Image (spheres, rainbow, N blue to C red):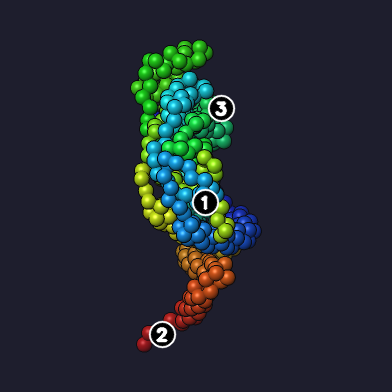
Amino acid sequence: MTDNFTESSSQSIFGRLGDAIKGVLFGLVLIPLAIVLLFWNEGRAVKTAASLKEGAAAVVAVSAAAVVPANEGKLVHLSGEATTSDVVRDPLFGVAQQALRLTRTVEMFQWQEEKKSETQKKLGGGTESQTTYTYTKNWAGQVIRSSEFKQPAEHANPTAMIGDTLATVASHVTMGKFVLPPAIVGKMRGDQALTLNTADAVQLPTDLQAKVKCVGDMFYLGADPAVPAIGDQRVKFTVLKPATFSILARQSGQTLDAYQTKAGREIERVESGTVPAATMFQHAKSENTVLTWALRLGGTLLMALGIGLILRPLATMADVLPLLGDLIGVGTAFAALLMAVMTSAVVIAVAWFAVRPLLSVVLIVAAIGAWIGGKRIAGKKPVAQA
């Protein structure tokens, strides 16, 4: 079910200019934040790469069948079945399983608000806007604050859920002779949906038995699961059963913990199945590369947004003639992106200079070349037609 509400508003050229000036101040904040993000990211990437290289050279392959004292404090790699004799129990619903981990997920049927605006420019620089608020009913894992809706009275949500999503980990998990700490178990993946039955419903606390229905793979709080109403809740469980995993970590007695490299990063990695150490390091290197480029892109776009906000008053003033404002807006957007790319390249070069001087020089030359090219393009005059 959906319903809509639309409201119209207008803004004069002076109001828009006021907003644009406020945007300039925000832009002046975003640019330093982008520079800090880019600089920090390069340092993080270099430290992570160096730590992985150090770890790959230092790792010792061990068998889970025995704890060798000579490997104390070393980075070790082992594969084997993680298992437990513990029965993990959900503290609220009483569901119990012999497993490495039991995870409860709670969702509530609620109103959700989506906002969509369309703005048209008017001659003279003002604007007319139409904002449509669309309300739909959906399942969500957190309470949605309907008090912040445009129409809260007609779309009220409950203010609390029966419980939060919760993971309960077995207290004693082993891999051969090694005892695995919760931090290692928390990194394990492969959880499967748990099908509930009437026996699980019997285990419910007395105060919940009258409220909860057991429906397939979930507990349901509400009148009819086929026709959910606002405020109805469903609770599902997943379970991580004993399985084979591969681990990179520091040997500490009979247990494992994070290995601190001289390069400044910790190594503590878990993957499903029997995975060689070299492959695990390659996966970590690939993840570092992806994260590095994602943060570079994010930092550049953040800087472009900041520069765009600083240039925005130019386009706003030009909107006295809407077509002229559109042209100026495209130009300032292109200029903001170009300046952001150049500045980001310089920041990255400076950040890398201490450890990668050759790459730093290449980036600086590329930035200068882009700046010169941009000036030449901007300085070209149209050729007169004969």
Q: Is residue 42 left or right of residue 221?
A: right
Identity of the residue furthest to the bottom in this view: 386
Residue that mark 1 sits on:
74
**Which tag, 2 or 3, sits closer to the chain's start?**
3
Return the x and y of residue 381 as percentages of the image width and height: 46, 82
Q: Quadrant of the C terminus?
A: bottom left
Tell me the element at label 3: loop
Q: CA distance from mark 2 to mark 1?
A: 75 Å
N-terminal of the pair, mark 1 or mark 3, is 1
What amino acid does circle 3 point to?
A: Thr
Amino acid type of the residue that numbered disc 1 sits on in the rendered structure: Lys
Question: Between residues 194 and 372, which one lies in front from this camera angle?
Answer: 194
Left or right: 1, with 353 as reference point:
left
Q: CA distance from mark 1 to mark 3?
A: 50 Å
Residue kind at label 2, given as amino acid type: Ala
Residue named by callout 3 = 159
Q: Secondary structure at mark 2?
A: loop
Residue 316 in percent (x, y) is at 55, 61
Q: Residues within 10 Å of mark 3 (few under 14, many from 20)?
A: few
Residue displayed at 39% across by 18% down = 214
Residues packed near mark 2 inside 10 Å, few (<14), some (14 to 19) or many (20 plus): few
Query: Could you say where residue 333 lies in the image, as x and y percent from the top left?
Result: 49, 64
Apparent side of residue 353 relative to residue 233 in the rendered image (left or right): right
Q: Which mark is in front, 1 or 3?
A: 1
Circle 1: element type = loop
Query: Residue 258: horizontal and vertical position, in percent?
Result: 54, 47
Task: Indicate whether 255 appears above or below 18.
Answer: above
Question: Nearest the camera: 296 or 91?
Answer: 91
Instruction: Answer above or below: position of 147 versus 51.
Output: above
Report the residue marked by disc 2.
Answer: 384
Whichever of callouts 2 and 1 sits on the residue coming sooner in the sequence is 1
Residue beneath the point at 43% across and 55% down:
281
